[in-house]
Image (cartoon, rainbow, N blue to C red):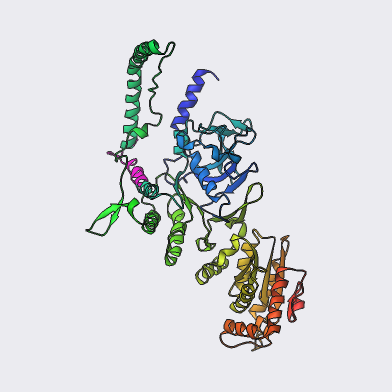
Amino acid sequence: MPPAKKAKQKETIEETSLESSDPTINKPRLRSLSIKNFRSIGNDEIKIDLDDIVVLVGPNNAGKSSILRAYELVMKHGSKECQLAISDFPSSQVNQSELPEITLETIVYDNSPGDQWITLTQEGEQLVKERWIWSSPNKDPKREGWNINTQDWDDKVPWGAPNIANSRRPQPHRVDAFSSPELQAQQITKLLLDLLQEKVKTIKSDQNQEKSDYENIIDTLKNFQSKVVESASTDIKEIEDEVSKYLDRIFPNHRIKLDAKPESDVEKTFSPFKSNPELSMGVTNGYYSKIENQGSGARRTLLWSTLKYLSDRNDKYENTRPHVLLLDEPEICLHPSAIREARDVLYELPQLVNWQIMITTHSPVFIDLSKDNTTIVRVERSEKNIECTTLYRPETAKLDEDDKKNLKLLNVCDPYLHEFFFGGKAIVVEGDTEYTAFSMIKNKYPREYSNIHIIRARGKGVILSVSKVLKQFSKNFAILHDSDTELTQDNKKNPSWGLNNSIQDLRTNTGIDINIIACKTNFEMAIFGEEAKYEKPYNALKRIESDPKIEKNVKQLLDSLIDISKKPPANCIRWSQINDLK
């Protein structure tokens, strides 16, 4: 490429901004993150499809925190924080055929970086792909862009220099589970300071002026910087020559080189606020101490207070840069009564402002499927690699409004409903009585049923809503329901009987093996021979405890739900046609 053309391309890149001047245009957002050969993640690439909210679940030490670290890492490109330690390489060794690699896909809506970098998705959105590769520890990675013209990775990257490119992507905010008090204080302070910085950048002395006052100051600094560099070049050369003369007397053939290049990110040289702002907390009109001197519970509560403020600010800063919150184990140090409120804060954040969220958690309370913006990903460690399985995506689940209402009510009744996302075989039961009976069997034989999760739907219709979710990621699960009767006691059509057709339809054209068993006409009648009028769960416990035959039948029913080859007890039927239930 001729020099003139190169200069022109560079100028275009520097002037490009993904943040549209039109406030009605969406801000850029992350679509996916792919990682390979990084820490415990091996040569088999893992890919995380990003939503407004991504919840990473899985056992301890499975690699969830490494996924959060990956995005933060590439956003540090251009600084030493982007350099890897030898321990970040697979097996703490540098293998040129298995180098750490992170790929990021960003959706842009306006002022794209050039047609050669834009891939159109099936939805018609503009997609930009970038890749970072680390060839050795303690050195900057190589960054590449996907060029659609050559259908290959290209050294000529979109958006140019790292600091310019980073300013075009959503800004990360990482909050580790066990950060030091000092680092936690910095993380909270940075969240608040970033808001102020964004506001400062929008100030205009005259609303008719083209650029903000901040932009004009940066432009002035750039011009001044160019003049300084130009005028100082002779002085730099003189310093190098003169000092090198004295150096040569002691170390022959040695000289110095003074690297006094201008700071590429001019914004680093100017801030209207002090470089190290402090955040303190204390009793009103009393003593205030630094956040890092507060207890862990107080620091974590302050974090949630800050996030709550961000979610409540609505469109107050609607033209600000988009953000990504990377949060490790949000349940840590929270009182049980505060966990649900914390979950609500997270789900409100993307709805009101330009935020995406990725969290790791061991708490099912932080999952709310009644929302349309949540993806659940299970992270597990195999013998050789880390594996990621997308368990749930709203666009594929296709929940209707009744389903969302059902799941929302279940969240209220049972905050641990979503434990099935964390592993194990799922069995959906209709009510409290069978849930209690099976729980008693599980407690009596803990080793035999340690990997079994009983989901209490609390209603026949809700079974359908829960099953839509399970069909997303489970190739086999079980359903236990009451057959009910075709007619009610007053000889009218029974709506509960009609739901049997819907349960039967769950197996249609899905390729999923659903083990469906019905109790005639309900669980109590099938197992106990009679239906208790009051305190049904307690009555079930007493009957199972006092009658070995009943306990045997309940265990047989549970075993037949776990293993489709096992026969259920009398009055319980594994059915496929409605006539089987009559």
The correct choice, above or below, for 509 with respect to 143 in the image is below
Foreground of the two, 177 or 466: 177
Which quadrant, please, contains the C terminus?
A: bottom right
Q: Position of residue 110 (x, y in %)?
A: 48, 40
Which quadrant, please, contains the N terminus?
A: top right
User: Is residue 318 found left or right of 403 in the rendered image?
Assistant: left
Is any atom of residue 266 visible in this view? Answer: yes
Identify the residue shown where x is 30% and y is 55%.
Answer: 281
- Outermost front residue: 250
Q: Position of residue 505 (x, y in %)?
A: 70, 68
Identify the residue shown where x is 55% and y is 50%.
Answer: 64
User: Is residue 264 found left or right of 106 in the rendered image?
Assistant: left
Foreground of the two, 180 or 568: 180
State the image quarter where residue 40 is shown.
top right
> Magenta residues, as a range?
193-211
Q: Position of residue 334 (x, y in %)?
A: 43, 61
User: Is residue 22 found left or right of 380 in the rendered image?
Assistant: left
State the image quarter where residue 236 is shown.
top left
Q: Position of residue 16 (x, y in %)?
A: 46, 33
Question: Is residue 198 covered in magenta?
Answer: yes
Question: Is residue 579 covered in magenta?
Answer: no
Identify the residue shown where x is 64% and y is 78%.
Answer: 496
User: Is residue 371 found left or right of 424 in the rendered image?
Assistant: left
Q: How many marks?
A: 0
The correct choice, above or below, for 570 with respect to 502 in the image is below
- Outermost left residue: 285
Is any atom of residue 502 visible in this view? Answer: no
State the image quarter where residue 399 is shown.
bottom right
